[in-house]
Each structure stands twice: as structure tokens, then as C-alpha cells.
Image: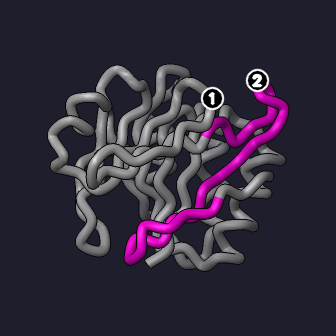
Amino acid sequence: MLIGIISDSHDHREALQKAVAVFNEHQVSYILHGGDIVSPFSAKIFQEVKSAKLIAVFGNNDGEKLFLKGAVEKGGGEIHEYCYKGTLANRRIFMTHTPHYIEEAILSQTYDLVIYGHTHKQDIRREGKTLIINPGESTDWLTGQGHVVILNLDTMEYQIIPL
């Protein structure tokens, strides 16, 4: 099963449209968003991904949380307040926005995949059995280049895709 991983999209419409094109091209089953979608208008763009369900966490810049939650849910997705803990394709996943909460999840070795955002800097590494992914920003505002990650949950192999 392929999933798309994105974070820190910050209402950057052009980058979101590029990300949606990548997710459609790879026919991902899920999009995991590590926070800072920001507005309900941006959340609607994810509805253009034909094959995928959006699972997101709120970030520190997400405004209008009630309407953002409504937009995500109207599109068939879900958004979580501080973290998401779930299982996809028999892989245990922990996702949060800020890096403050990931060390305990990593050290526990309970999760196959830990996703976070907030820093706008890519961080992809393995610690024990856990793959940690911060895809970096999907905008180009701080680093000059947005990215998303495509992850095969069956093999845990990933591709970093520039936007």
C-alpha cells in the first residue's frame, strides 16, 4: 500500500496542487498530513486526490479549527488534535506536528512509522524498527524547495519527491 506524506502546506495553493498531482500519479491510498494545513479552503484541495483518504493532525498555525475539521471530514478524511495513533497495512503509525512528542514514541519501539512536521526541514531516518519521517515543508518558503514523500507500507521503502 502506498501512502503520501506531507506537512506544513501553509495555504500554499500551487504547492498543494503539485502534491495532489503526485499523490494521484502514485495512486496513494492515504495521505498523512503532519500539520499546518492552515485554512479550510486548503483542506478542500485534498478532495482532488481520487483514491486516498486524508488523515491529518492540527499544527500550531492551523486556524479556524472547527471549519478546518469540517472541511477535512466533509471530504471523507479525519483530523486529530495532538496526535494520530493508528494502523494501516499492519503498520503501527504515530503522527504529530511538533517534534516534542516523537522521542517517547520512537524509544518505545511500538511504532513502525513516526511522522512529524513543524521544523520545515526534512528528517528521514531509522531508529531500531521505527522509520521517522518529517517530509519537510511542502511550500518553498523557508527552504526554497517543497517536498512530499511516497512510502510503500509493505516494504517501508520511500521516495522523496520535489514539488
Could you give the CA–CA distance between mark 1 and mark 2, rounded to whole angstroms?
7 Å
* Cβ atoms under marks 1 and 2 closer than 8 Å: yes
Q: Which residue is mark 2?
A: 142
Q: Nearer the viewer, residue 64 or 135?
A: 135
Amino acid tagged 1: His
Q: Residue 126: x percent and y percent?
A: 40, 48
Q: Is residue 130 magenta?
A: no
What residue do we see at 77% from left, 52% from top? 162
Q: Specify the color scheme.
A: one colour
Q: Position of residue 101 (x, y in %)?
A: 29, 26
| Location of mark 1 (residue) | 120
Give the side of residue 156 with respect to residue 160, left or right.
Answer: left
Task: Determine whether 4 is above or below 83 in the image.
Answer: below
Q: Quadrant of the N terminus?
A: bottom left
The vertical placement of 16 against 141, above or below, is: below
Q: Residues within 10 Å of mark 2 (few under 14, many from 20)?
A: few
Is 76 left, or right, of 41 in this rendering?
left
In depth, the one of 44 and 158 nearer the eye is 158
Q: Secondary structure at mark 1?
A: loop
Residue depicted at x 84% and y 32% = 144
Q: Quadrant of residue 20?
A: bottom right
- The image shows residue 148, relative to residue 30, as above or below, that is above
Left or right side of 112 for 64:
right
Quick check: can you spot residue 75?
Answer: no
Q: Start and end of the magenta stretch? A: 136-159
What's the residue type where badge 2 is placed? Answer: Leu
Residue under the point 78% across and 44% down = 13
Residue at (72% x, 50% y) in the render: 16
**Does residue 104 appear anywhere in the picture?**
yes
